[in-house]
Amino acid sequence: MNFFINATASLSRLFGYIAASLLFVAVLVVCHMVFTRFVLNLPTSWQTEFVTYVLLASTFLGAPWVLLERGHVNVELVPLMLGDRGRFILAFIAYAGATALCAVIAYEAYIFWHEAWVEDWSSDTIWAPKLWKAYLAMPIGFALITLQYLADLLCLITGRDTPFGLPAVNQEAN
């Protein structure tokens, strides 16, 4: 179990770095596009579409790292009002539900990606990139976030982590 949790955390960190690198590439391409358009007064054909795909890939591939670092928006009002057992039950339901939802989306995203690959879809632009390359980030990202949710669920069940990362109610009274 430790191996799975540590390996998942390492994968989430790796893809966090990949997502950050993709953001950096997107910034460079936008700078290139601005320079080409407004300084050289030349048309651009691929940059806007490339940046769109790269930003989407960065979002999907970086989501597991954000979950690992507890960076998603989290409303703690209800967990703060509950005791330790209530927090555990709520966290278990939330983590299990999120794991199941992300697994279903990963499966559906894989089917969508596979269809784009088999049918050789291309975008309807002048650049016309193969869409399977752009869509590949969806099943990978959702598979990784499913693994990260599963690791978080295991940490919750085994007591390695507290529900929602909040301190125990009994510890606050001491």
Image (cartoon, rainbow, N blue to C red):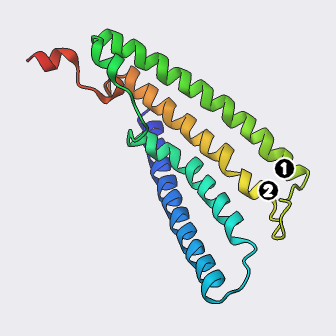
Q: Quadrant of residue 69?
A: top left
Under circle 2, the secondary element is helix
Left or right: 15 with respect to 171?
right
Residue kind at label 2, given as amino acid type: Leu
Measured along the vertical axis of the image, is residue 40 above or below residue 151? below
Badge 1: few (under 14), some or many (20 or more) residues near its Cα, within 10 Å?
Answer: some
Q: Which residue is mark 2?
A: 131
Looking at marks 2 and 1 on the same chain, the residue that comes earlier in the sequence is marked by 1
Counting from the top left corner in percent of width and height, residue 107 is at: 72, 34
The structure residue drawn at horizontal position 56% and vertical position 27%, both measured from the top left corner, is: 99
Q: Is residue 82 or residue 46 the one in the foreground? A: 46
Contact between labelled residues 1 and 2, with CB atoms less than 8 Å apart: yes
Image point (72%, 77%), residue name: 44
Frontmost residue, 153 versus 23: 23
Q: Is residue 146 left or right of residue 115?
A: left
What residue is shown with label 1? 116
Q: Pinpoint residue 77: horizontal percent, then vertical percent.
A: 33, 20
Q: Mark 1 belongs to which amino acid?
A: Ala
Horizontal relation, residue 42 to residue 66: left or right? right
Q: Residue at x 43, y 31 (%)?
A: 152
Where residue 33 appears, x then y in whole percent? 63, 77
Which residue: 64% across, 83% down?
36
Height in image: 123 above or below 75? below
Q: Position of residue 136 (x, y in %)?
A: 71, 51
Instruction: Indicate the quadrant where residue 159 lies.
Output: top left
